[in-house]
Image (cartoon, grey):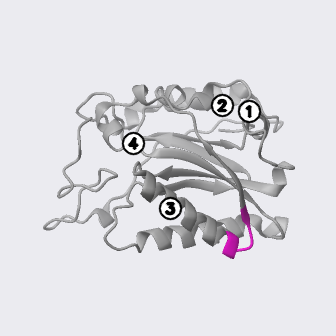
Amino acid sequence: MKKIASHICNAAGFPKARGLYDPNYEHDSCGVGFVANIEGFPQHEIVEHGIQVLTNLEHRGAIGGDKATSDGAGVLVQIPHHLLKEECPEIDFASPEHYAVAMVFLPSDPKLAHRCLKTMESIIKREGCKIIGTRDVPVDSEQLGELARITEPKVVQVFIGRRKVMLENFERKLYVIRRLIEKEVQGWKNVDASQFYIVSMSSHTVIYKGLLTGSQLPMYYPDLDDIRFTSAFA
């Protein structure tokens, strides 16, 4: 596997500040589509339609020099509660309103990934919640372009129990937790934790994304192709 020149880019593949260039001035530009079941009934078909929307929007994105690495695509859907319960029988999910899912990109360095998870655990506990389990998200790295494979992170779902946090305050608490974690990790000195990224953290929705085209997304994430994965919108 090729390595990124560390004096030019960080572990996530972003160029370092140099001359007049500063990565802090980078910004995103997206094409967006929305599909939903008008009666609010979760279906796998809605997830499939969401992927089709992404495929139809591929012309809105750029493709890298390897002809296979996209500048990114993703889908926001409802948490697939039944799939998670079957895939993680050792975790006590109780009922959907009692937990949240954090979709997390961890550094490919195992020691640094462990440090990030321990930091998450500490802050989540401090804020009155609790990690009730984790899941390594199934991925097929062969679907990635060569450029995307160089910076591929480890993808993990962290399940957060709300404990005594009131239901009506849970989403706000999750936002606070996310920002505290991001601030803590970004403040580390002499460590390249640029691959660490909280993709989503919510008790209602989860986001699957990456440096993928719309058509690559369900091939990289087998979850999205699983008939048990249902949502009322995408």
Q: Is residue 31 visible?
A: yes
For residue 3, side relative to residue 36 (left or right): left
Report helix, strand or loop for mark 2.
helix
Residue holding disc 2: 47
Q: Nearer the viewer, residue 98 or 41?
A: 98
Residue 95, percent from left and from top? 86, 49
Q: Is residue 200 above or below residue 221?
A: below
Residue holding disc 1: 230
Circle 1: residue type: Thr
Labels 2 & 4 near each other (Cβ < 8 A): no
Mark on residue 152?
A: 4
In primary-sequence order, the first of circles 3 and 2 is 2
Residue at the farthest right position: 95
Mark 2 surroundings within 10 Å by alpha-carbon count, few (fewer than 14), some (14 through 19), many (20 or more): many
Q: Report the magenta residues as a range.
A: 125-130
In primary-sequence order, the first of circles 1 and 4 is 4
Mark 4 surroundings within 10 Å by alpha-carbon count, few (fewer than 14), some (14 through 19), many (20 or more): many
Q: Quadrant of residue 176?
A: bottom right
Labels 1 & 4 near each other (Cβ < 8 A): no
In space, the residues marked 1 and 3 are separated at their CA atoms by 30 Å
- Which mark is in front, 1 or 3? 3
Mark 3 surroundings within 10 Å by alpha-carbon count, few (fewer than 14), some (14 through 19), many (20 or more): many
Labels 3 & 4 near each other (Cβ < 8 A): no
Q: Quadrant of residue 169?
A: bottom right
Residue holding disc 3: 116
Mark 1 surroundings within 10 Å by alpha-carbon count, few (fewer than 14), some (14 through 19), many (20 or more): many
